[in-house]
Image (tube, coloured by chain):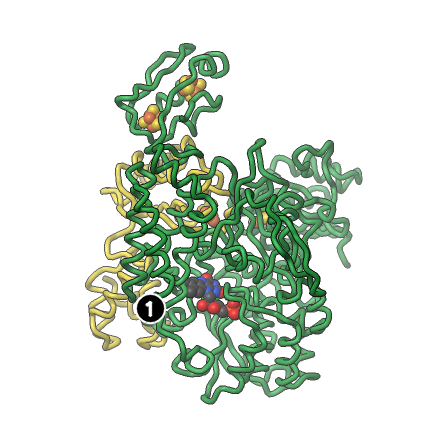
Chain colours: A green, B yellow
Amino acid sequence: MPYRVHCMVCAGTGCVSNRSLDVREALEREIRKRGLQEEIQVVTTGCNGFCAVGPLMVVQPDGIFYQQLTPKDIPYLVEEHFIKGRPAQKLMYTPPEAPSPIPRMSDIPFFKHQRLIALRNRGLIDPEKIEDYIARDGYQALVKALTRMTPEQIIEEITRSGLRGRGGAGFPTGVKWRKVREASGEPKYIICNGDEGDPGAFMDRSIFESDPHSVIEGMLIGARAIGARHGVVYIRNEYPLALERIQIAIQQAREYGLLGENILDSGLDFDISVTRGAGAFVCGEETALIASVEGRLGDPRARPPYPSEYGLWGKPTCINNVETWANVPPIIMHGADWYSQIGTERSKGTKVFSLVGKVRNTGLVEVPMGITLRELIYDIGGGIPGDKKFKAVQTGGPSGGCIPAGMMDQPIEYVAPDGKREARDYLDLPIDYESLTDVGSMMGSGGLVVMDEDTCMVDVARYFLAFTQDESCGACTPCREGTKLMLDILNRIVEGHGTMDDLRALEEIGWVVKQTSLCGLGKTAPNPVLTTIKYFRDEYVAHIEAHKCPARVCRELNTYRIDPVICVERGHGCGVCRRECPEKAIFGEKNQPHRIDPALCKKCGVCVDVCHFNAVIVE
Amino acid sequence: MELATIEGIIRQHGAQKSGLIAMLQDIQHEYTYLPEDVLRHLSRTLNVPLSRAYSLATFYRAFSLKPKGRHPISVCLGTACHVKGAVKILEKFERELGIKTGQTTPDLNFGLEQVRCLGCCGLAPVVTVGQDLYGKVTVTKVDQIIKRYRKQETAHAKT
Ligand SMILES: Cc1cc2nc3c(=O)[nH]c(=O)nc-3n(C[C@H](O)[C@H](O)[C@H](O)COP(=O)(O)O)c2cc1C
Ligand code: SF4
Ligand code: SF4
Ligand code: FES
Ligand code: FES
């Protein structure tokens, strides 16, 4: 008997860490207790993208959205929603400043503006059940590709769709597939790049966790198109749950005859193996990744030859990103025309962004290409928390750059899809591969870090450079030594020992590293530094000349003191800071104002974080 | 070194040189580090130079040549966590455990590492201890986290 109601409990990494599995258990128990087990089904799904309000659950078919659930809430929820038939308001989500809770998921601003293609099944299926995927038309695109299309037609369809690689560079997927198909050498391989190295992006993890079969189906269609018999899924070491889910999915696909020999009687033989990354960012680069799959050191090599001619084991290899593969089945299913009507002139379809940093609704969102930064940050993201001023947005991870809010009023020229030119604000900049490059940043994997007035741009630049310097494989001198020199300079600047000559040196070295490095890591590593110098020069100058960090982030340049009035009146001299100060630099008694001894203070900043009453002043 | 375990791991990856990284991962998982005698055994069995095994072991972050501690703590310093003050969380762990990042406590109970993005940026700052993940960690929560595992260890020691 079909169920009347489905409770979709989120079991992505974020919600599980907030004990969503306990919530599921409590729910199942309560449902049995009430004798509703014939009517209500409990399903565990992958990440819904809104982990910040987890654990969450969506009740279908009505799409009622519950958030921040605990096992204790469950008896009340079952009683109200399933017995009395009135959804439990107090467990729903209320956006900041909204007067009342919003019952339906589809009405919540965070979800309302999204358009799901790569993430089409998120939250709607149990990722560990192939039957769920199939029930939502899963593997129908494969059937179509195998029975009604020639490999040529598949490639043609993907090319016409305008799909471009989601792993960073935005290379046209159809063009890549054709190259591999036409390359000489057998056997051919395909690889799914799930190394996801950008330290603030998690779309690939989410796809593996919430809908692993979409990747497998995409790879199967790719295999048919280019004539490959073997595929490799390369998955980042830090993603145990994603690894488990893709392994389960591959096993199930084999049992269903969707992987193996003579798939669906079409004559296609194809199987997939999984390789775990071992914790090296540079292994996301395609040639390094291939070396790592072969059991070698993950050193990138010069291209050409490209993997499409000389890839895994020296054979033609088609390597695409996880999100790229997940887009393939819907394109084959609904056609290139359907897909290419979404997006901008040169960037088609949707893109998954991870919206993080100083924004109210952090999470994973899939939106049409061409959406504006304003829609992303304000409509979906809910704006900046706590009355702070929006300062910049960083895109493209360690290879990308910062787009300043200050340029909001400086319109830039935008060429509309129909060729018309118009002036637009930066915030109204339609995001696509080209527009981001034009403003000195890039799409990258889709990391979008929002920064407010409390974010120091010099610190951000230093952060990314420390990252790339640390992850540089060391094979080429400009990248290895250049990034180290730049980092030394930046460290000097944030400690207040920088000079204006340092600033010039940063730009010069940055330029050399960009021009002369071997792989994309080095070629792009200076970007965060160069864009912040370009747009936020005054912040650098403040660090150098005034020895001040305007955002009060660079700790060496700050001084800390306690406002005695706030400390006593609001905090009653609670003493938390005194206990937490590692230098024992804070003195005071309960109900008395506390005081920091500047001679002892090592400027660690802990007191600011632990004081619940904002009594610690940073200057 | 338990020969049967190692042999099992080697066989599972087809006793092929290309499976070397995967074997090292399993060994790392089994022992929390790559013991020298195991590396020697591996290099003899697969007929690869010991130096090759060592270069892999030092290139990839997942490997360690020293024991990692029963409760490996990883503090995320990814972008989202960084802008939310993760460095202070890491420093607090260093102080509480009396070790630096990359080290293991003398009793081998805790190891401390930094990682870059655990893929739950919505919960920044994020910390993992073994398989457990903690989101929205604050300096004051660090004590509670450590306490929980210390308790486990003392309970363990008693039985
Ligand atoms: C340093 C570096 C790191 C990279 N990391 C990744 C990554 O984590 N995931 C990814 O898909 N592509 C990454 N790439 C891009 C890949 O080299 C490759 O272009 C991509 O996987 C191709 O797939 P696509 O065409 O579907 O984007 C990286 C490139 C560089 C230079
Ligand atoms: S934590 Fe804040 S309120 Fe409490 S004693 Fe320190 S400064 Fe005063
Ligand atoms: S900044 Fe650090 S050392 Fe200085 S008073 Fe605050 S807690 Fe103590
Ligand atoms: S894990 Fe539940 S919303 Fe991300
Ligand atoms: S940055 Fe810490 S989880 Fe992503």
Q: Does residue A216 sit above or below A366 in this rendering?
A: below
Note whether residue A463 is visible.
yes
Name the quadrant of the N terminus of chain A: bottom right
Residue A39 on image: x %, y %: 75, 51
Furthest toward the top, the residue is: A592
Q: Is mark 1 within 8 Å of ligand 1?
A: no
Is residue A227 depicted above or below A412 in this figure? below
x and y, in percent, of residue A314 in the image: 39, 82
Question: On the rendered image, what quadrant is the C terminus of chain A found in?
Answer: top left
Q: Chain of mark 1?
A: A
Q: Quadrant of residue A153?
A: bottom right
For the point 62% across and 49% down, the residue is A411
Q: Is B7 in front, or is A526? A: A526
Q: Nearer the viewer, residue A34 or A287?
A: A287
Residue at coordinates 47% horizontally, 89% vertically from top-left? Answer: A184
Q: Which residue is mark 1?
A: A299
Q: Residue at x 23, y 77 (%)?
A: B47
Q: Quadrant of residue A577?
A: top left
Q: Is residue B52 left or right of residue A587?
A: left
Q: x and y percent of residue A195 in the render?
A: 45, 62
